[in-house]
Image (cartoon, grey):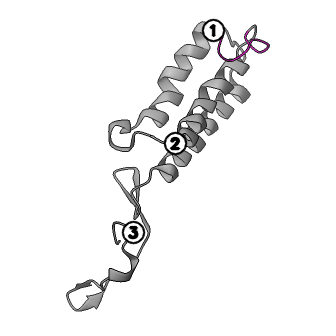
Amino acid sequence: MHIGNCLHQKADYFMEGQKLKECYEEKDLGILISSDLKVGAQCNQAFLKANRMLGLIKRTITNKTPDVMLSLYKSVVRPHVEYCVSVWAPYYIKDKKLLERIQHRLTKLIPGLQHLPYTD
């Protein structure tokens, strides 16, 4: 992987006489690292995992009281969003809004909160 945007200075890398394949994105310890060091792909991956967990909760849980939903959110959904966030902390507004949609969807799952504006 070539880090940075100097595309004209790409070099070929060899290990034990074999040329290594070039990649633009690599997963290491569960974090996607891209060659431009932007975290959009990691935010998207965290959003998809957390969204899947919310879908699972929606399909399987019948007692959707605020206490139960908050407990499930903190134990099942939030770890996907916050995993190693100190490393890949989103700084683009689009990435922050994407992750904010997870909490927005949770509030829509709780009876009594569905018709309130998200900010309330």
The residue at which mark 3 appears reads as 5
Alpha carbons under labels 2 and 3: distance apart: 25 Å
Q: Determine the secondary structure under disc 1.
A: helix
**How many numbered marks appear?**
3
Of the residues shown, which amino acid type is indicated by label 2? Ala
Q: Is residue 28 visible?
A: yes
Q: Residue at x 53, y 29 (%)?
A: 77
What range is drawn magenta here? 113-120
Secondary structure beneath dot 3 equals: loop
Kindly report the distance in space between the C-alpha atoms of the residues bearing marks 3 and 1: 47 Å
Query: Is 5 inside the magenta-drawn segment?
Result: no
In the picture, the disc for residue 46 is 2
Residue that numbered label 1 is attached to: 66
Give how far across and how far down residue 71 sits, in percent. 53, 15
As displayed, is residue 21 above or below residue 37? below
Comes first in the chain, label 3 or label 1: 3
- Asked whether, in this view, residue 110 is left or right of residue 27, the answer is right
- Amino acid under disc 1: Pro
